[in-house]
Image (tube, rainbow, N blue to C red):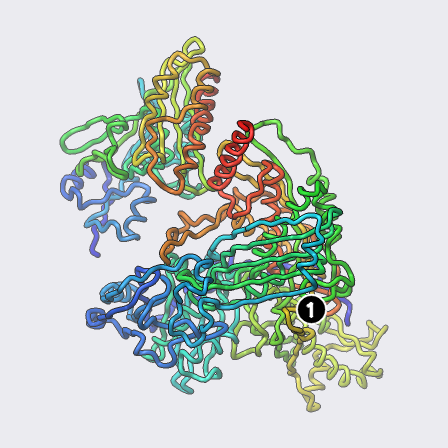
Amino acid sequence: MNTEFYRPSCKEDAIKLLSKYGKDLMIVNGGTDAVLSIVEGKADPKAIMHVAGLPGFHEIMEDGDYLYIGGGATFAEMQASPAIARYKGLIEALSHLASPAIRTIGTAAGNICTAAPAADCAAMLYALRAEAVLESSEGTRILPLSDFYITTSSYSTVIKENELVTEIRIPLLRKGEGSGYCRLSRRKAQDIAKVIIGVRLALENEAIASCSVALGALNATLVHGETIEKAVIGMKKEEALEYVRSTFPPEAKLHRSYFTEYKKDVVAAAVERAFSMALGNAEGEF
Amino acid sequence: MNKTKYVGQRLPRTDSLAKATGAARYTGDIWVNRRDILYAKALFPPYGHARIKSIDTSEAEAIEGVAAVMVADDLPGMNGYGGMVPDKPVIAKDEVLYEGDPVALVAAETKEIAEKAVKLIKVEYEPLPGYDDPVKMLDPSSPMLHTDNPFHKNHNISDEQIIKKGDVEKAFREADVVIDNWYKTPLVDHAYMEPDAAIAEYDPIQGGITIWSPQHAVQLAKRAMSDAFGLPQSRIHVISQLVGGGFGGKEDSTFDVSVVAGVLSIKTHRPVYFELTRDEVFKGTGKRHPSIIHHQLAARKDGKILGIKVETIIDKGAYKSIDAIPSRTTQYAGGPYSIDNALTHSWSVFTDHPYGCAFRGLGSPQAHFAMECQMDELARKLDMDPVELRLKNILRDGDTTIWGQPMMEERGLGLEECIRRVTSDPKFNEPLDNSDPRIRRGRGIACFMYGTGTGSATDGAHVMVQAQPDGSINIGVSASELGQGFLIAMKQIAADTMGVTIDKIYLDYADSAASLESGATVASRTTVLTGNAIINGLEKLKERFSAVAAPMLKTGKENVCFYQNMVFAKGLENEGIKLTAVIAKAFASQVPLGAIGSWYPPMATPKGDGLGDKMHTYAFGCEGVQVAVDMETGEITVEDALLACDIGKAINPDTLEGQFEGGMAQAIGWALMEEHFMSDGKMKNHTFHDFLIPTAKDIPDLRTIIVEHPNALGPFGAKGAGEPPIVPGAPAIRNAVYDAIGIGLNEIPMTPVRVMEALRKKSAENADKSRR
């Protein structure tokens, strides 16, 4: 009932509030998930802290070996950012995420923290081997997304109650690298995906030199398609496409649902499409 | 009849601007702006079927700000209400039959208090088995859902209808081919934007009650709720606010909220507001009836249909509501074709599901889905062009329908023109791009007919018209503005009839105290029936005014003409006098300025065996669709859709095209994605997150063709147009998918899951064949 509402003016104040309230404080960034959970009565926080206005929180820039995405950067800001334009897979993921209205307020940081298994942006970031920068009164730690989620259950992360995601960073796409994305859903917009595939790969001498595959909406959490990641190393384009077209990634442990058989039928095609986009992106102009 | 100036013109709807700017006021807006009003909540059960063992309301009653808590024993009148029979309890007493049966009601000073109080009501339930399957429930050995309802005595059958024409067995014996298939259509919500809401205010002066709520039928509402209120029908005053989408659903789902607000207002003598959350709308309000159809069609090898045998089992849900579906599914089981021998049989069967109610098309979409799929199956079997096959069988002047009604060109018979205009459309004949083996494209068509009005003996419309001394005209009409554009259409008809400028026409609409019974705003009936009643009323005024004007114009009254607020003798347009002068003279000469206008269609004539004339006129149409099917993901994309529909006369082509496009889009939803899943009487998907309706991206550029074969009995030749456009979409899409992938899907919605399942089955069959 008597929820306190804070809008800190700097990161330091935000971190102090986190230390003060701990788990009783709900961080609201875009609020597209948080507000829903409050309205549905799933959350009843003592205090709400709105972080979208923190200085510098919306910045998106390249620096050194990384592309940095500010903790308050919205999906729409990412879509419009020249620094992200050549991350074709990420642009594709963003352009299918929810609706234009949601994209103007929802954020990548919020997306990874909600930890939904069918999160478009988070899945693509996972494939891009992105890392979360977590700050607290105890200091800063940087976690790859593969260590960020608690893999045994949906909607859970290792983030501590005094920590704030201040940035997400992606190892820069170098020449010869590309990313691709494919989602399958029941309708053409505003629908939670039933299959999400994100791919990042590097080509050297026309063969795949490194590869990262994210599988979304297939398990309780996002997972890597490690079997495919390993198998395609050294393969040329057509060989790789032929391989993924005929391989159901064993890391996708489908639970029994109305969609199980359907997913069995379509996952390989989705992987192929994501690969095809990533290969095109890798071969494209740098 | 005067010269027409407005009928046929593309005039903007009167409600568009206010709705676009937010100035339009809906029921919820009244509540927000009133200070004296109580807020109501209902407690709904967590079960689809359960016995109520005990209810304890003491904690809820103890909260400050709670004005009333009601259980079944506290009701002012009979514990029942309903559009056709009062079979639905206001508050469940001993047993809940679906998730939408309220167990207790609360009215409180604020929304927050009401929400808190309703959570404190303690109910002990004994869960009972959920009855989900209408086929099992039709079996006489199945348990009965209604064990103690005075309106339901025929086991689990709510209604049963049969049409018998000719000698079906002989037709099947003599047939060269028989097409025999099962079809299935889903349970779907109307998904109107505005959730159901009502305000009730007790009238201490005469002991009546006023209800404000979005309604299809303000006069029907008086009858539907009078027993529950314990009040004579005359004391119930119903006003329909603007309706934020109805599609038939608010014909009686509105009673669910109105009756709750009403009994609480009668108890507290305070105004009460009750609205449903979206979750409650999904679980509790009426739905489109799901159907299971066994369709058998007998034909000669030249394509002539000899007979049909059709059995349709309809999931009625828990209560009767509007139960015209057996009647409509038997009627339309043979589509718009001339068939001499027919046996069509339909049952609506009770289950623990949300009650099936009116939904755009009222059973006709289900029936046509099966029949139009059968037509393509027959065309394939005979290796005939599906267009030629249809042209060979369509109803023409002098043919009789399967219910024995002769078809007449003078009532408008434009189906052949619709088919020819769709199938000769250049875009519909462009070569299909099938260069990518992963994407298969195809085209399909479907035809239909749809009657104007209810086709029952009670169908008719009555309005009040009154000329004002300043030359403006009031028309009291009980119909509702649902977003269909009824107001502008009535103004166009009235202005041309009366010979006044359109700004002179003002409608006192959707208020039971300012209008007479003109039937519900349903059944594609308002333009024709209410329009004709308005014409009838205005003609009466004109006749009186002609008698007054004749001496003023020095002519005979038969020569008096009315046009653009002027009255003149025939041929002497420039020597006219103002209509206001005639009205002033009439007012001063004991000539009444008001009249009642009435219109009845020709009487529906039941002759036994389900035969006899039903509606006086029918809309006809044909839709052509192009789809692309992704063979790897099962995704269907509707790439092109073209609807030609014969509606007699377009009173306002803009609003008419709006109806066409709306129906086509809604059909895409029904065909491809909309579907509620029920288990043990409980709805599994009750949010817009998992009950999907189409977005703008799922709808192609919808193309429409207005075809006008006038109905001699319609206003300016019009036929009903509201529902027809939804009917052909689903079978046209299904037939296009058939063309694309060579598989006929007989269950909708055709989701990616079902498409992949069908492709999997086919590839297993092919593998099996090649092994042998």
Please give the name of the residue rendered at 51% of the width and 47% of the height, measured from the top-left corner: B749
Residue B308 image-quadrant placement: bottom right
**Amino acid under disc 1:** His
User: Taking the image as drawn, is residue B658 in sight?
Assistant: no
Task: Looking at the picture, tell me which residue is in the foreground, A4 or A158.
Answer: A158
Please give the name of the residue rendered at 52% of the width and 52% of the height, measured from the top-left corner: B185
The local crowd at label 1, few if under 14, some if 14 to 19, many if 20 or more residues have their Cα within 10 Å, is many
What is the tally of numbered marks visible in this picture?
A: 1
Above or below, B569 relative to A148:
below
In this view, which residue lies farthest toward the top?
A: A205
Classify the position of the N terminus of chain B by image quarter.
bottom right
Above or below, B374 relative to B136:
above
Does residue B348 appear to the left or right of B328 in the view shown? left
Q: Residue B647, percent across and down?
A: 69, 59
Classify the position of the C terminus of chain B by image quarter.
top right
In which chain is the residue bearing label 1? B
The residue pinned by badge 1 equals B616
Q: Residue A26, percent across and down?
A: 23, 44
Task: Looking at the picture, tell me which residue is in the foreground, B171 or B561.
Answer: B171
Q: Residue B694, percent across and down?
A: 50, 47
Q: Residue A266, percent across and down?
A: 45, 32
Residue A274 image-quadrant placement: top left
Please give the name of the residue rendered at 83% of the width and 78% of the height, measured from the top-left corner: B559
